[in-house]
Image: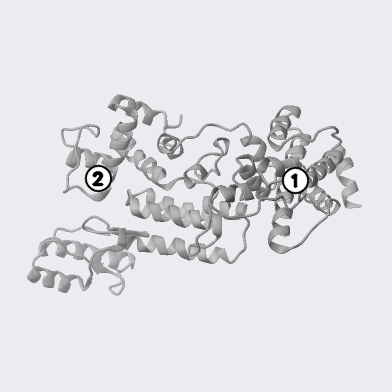
């Protein structure tokens, strides 16, 4: 991309230089793939410039390195390329029949990577960011962007760390502001950036980044940076506090860390005690997801659906003796309690039939964090929650019934395979406990 003053002598000088460069290196601009854009140039001058260069005139906006460039503010309609790309990705992966954990991994990697590239450059309109959140929310809960589903957990609470009860998804509105904060930091360290020196001379002039005001004549990217500055000042109160907040986002090597700046903007929730017990590396991911929902009583149990206005007969399909609630299902129900006792017997633990939340607290204090038995208990607890919920859904929606012995056998096999994959086959004590499930 080359910027030239819109007059014939300037264009002639650049064209001559490009021809000289091509004659020496053999690299010549392809006239079929090169366009020229004008702004504030008279019609007769345009014709002479096009004759000199041989390039075709095109109009704004145009794409450069995947981003749209425009001579004015980017409208919401101009983000169609990003929105359609995410829609295409979501529709493609919908057919893969991923579990909730699989969709969550897809959101935190593929889709967030697409969003992050744009958020790193521009402050995108709130309408676009809300649409991106909607696409991600619909995909996580229903695997389609066209069919409405019942969301048992708000998207804001999903976009928080595991230790706060969320799914560790980045909230794009906050991430967009955090990304632009690194440009604020560059303006505070001007000797390291030619970009910063240029803005200090032509945009800031005799002001500082904390005192200058926005103007309609500024570029959209500069106004975006000033908007992030205003948000930071609103949170911190003073410019000195804002500067200190930015300094705390810099690593010892001097690199600005956007992830630390994101902590300034994202919504915060109280920490939960069960976060590390549920999102343990030993646990199968899809088991962790269901266990986290159960720990917050966010599963679509009958009592939750009744509170949301559904007219249903509230009866537990596992024991047919009580109303279906989270407290009953895990593990006050006779069926689920018996399954949990069977799993505890496999682990050599007797005399425990506590509630799910009590078991989460107990497993965190009983074993050392790095001992394989700690991972074993956590994995078994999460697997039990998952198999109970799967059995409940199979009876309601599929008319299929499994015995406690069948579920316990499947559970032990899934957990045993996971433990061997995690800790390896060299742990003889662990293998003595696990070998019987394969014989």
The residue labelled by disc 1 is 384
Element carrying mark 2: helix
Residue 271, quarter of picture: top right
Does residue 143 appear anywhere in the picture? Answer: yes
Q: Where does the image place residue 438, in percent across and percent down from the top left?
A: 88, 52
> Which secondary structure lies at badge 1?
helix
Identify the image quadrant of the N terminus.
bottom left
Q: Position of residue 418 (x, y in %)?
A: 75, 48
Q: Is residue 142 left or right of residue 283?
A: left
On the picture, is 192 further left or further right than 294?
Answer: left
Closer-to-camera residue (281/354): 354
Q: Quadrant of residue 205?
A: top left
Instruction: Indicate the quadrant where residue 188 lies.
Output: top left
Q: Residue at x 47, y 53 (%)?
A: 113
Viewer-nearest residue: 343 or 61: 343
Q: Please, is residue 67 above or below residue 274 in the view?
A: below
> What percent of the width, then of the height, locates residue 101?
61, 52
- Tell which tag, 1 or 2, sits nearer the viewer: 1
Mark 1 or mark 2: which comes first in sequence?
2
Residue drawn at the location 20% of the way across and 70% of the way down: 53
Mark 2 sits on what residue?
223
């Amino acid at each position: 991309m080359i910027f030239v003053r819109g007059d014939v002598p300037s264009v002639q000088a650049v064209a001559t230089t490009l021809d000289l460069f091509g004659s020496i290196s053999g690299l010549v601009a392809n006239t079929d793939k090169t366009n020229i854009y004008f702004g504030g140039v008279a019609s007769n001058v345009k014709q002479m410039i096009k004759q000199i260069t041989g390039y075709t005139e095109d109009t704004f906006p145009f794409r450069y390195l995947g981003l749209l460039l425009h001579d004015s503010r980017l409208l919401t309609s101009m983000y169609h390329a990003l929105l359609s790309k995410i829609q295409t990705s979501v529709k493609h992966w919908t057919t893969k029949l991923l579990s909730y954990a699989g969709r969550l991994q897809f959101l935190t990697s593929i889709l967030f990577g697409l969003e992050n590239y744009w958020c790193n450059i521009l402050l995108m309109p709130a309408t676009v960011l809300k649409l991106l959140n909607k696409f991600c929310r619909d995909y996580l809960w229903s695997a389609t962007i066209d069919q409405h589903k019942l969301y048992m957990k708000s998207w804001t609470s999903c976009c928080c760390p595991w230790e706060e009860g969320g799914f560790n998804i980045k909230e794009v509105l906050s991430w967009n502001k955090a990304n632009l904060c690194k440009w604020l930091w560059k303006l505070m360290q001007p000797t390291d950036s030619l970009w910063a020196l240029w803005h200090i001379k032509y945009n800031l002039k005799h002001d500082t980044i904390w005192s200058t005001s926005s103007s309609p004549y500024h570029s959209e990217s500069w106004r975006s940076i000033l908007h992030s500055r205003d948000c930071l000042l609103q949170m911190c109160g003073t410019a000195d506090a804002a500067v200190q907040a930015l300094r705390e986002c810099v690593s010892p090597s001097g690199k600005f860390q956007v992830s630390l700046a994101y902590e300034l903007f994202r919504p915060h929730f109280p920490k939960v005690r069960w976060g590390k017990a549920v999102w343990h590396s030993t646990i199968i991911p899809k088991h962790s997801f269901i266990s986290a929902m159960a720990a917050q009583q966010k599963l679509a149990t009958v009592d939750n659906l009744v509170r949301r206005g559904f007219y249903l007969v509230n009866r537990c399909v596992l024991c047919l003796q009580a109303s279906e609630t989270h407290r009953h299902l895990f593990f006050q129900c006779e069926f689920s309690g018996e399954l949990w006792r069977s799993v505890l017997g496999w682990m050599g633990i007797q005399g425990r039939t506590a509630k799910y939340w009590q078991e989460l607290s107990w497993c965190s204090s009983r074993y050392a964090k790095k001992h394989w038995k700690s991972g074993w208990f956590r994995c078994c607890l999460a697997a039990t929650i998952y198999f109970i919920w799967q059995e409940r859904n199979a009876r309601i929606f599929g008319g299929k019934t499994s015995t406690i012995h069948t579920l316990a056998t499947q559970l032990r096999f899934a957990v045993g395979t996971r433990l061997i994959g995690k800790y390896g086959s060299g742990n003889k004590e662990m293998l003595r406990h696990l070998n019987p499930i394969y014989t």
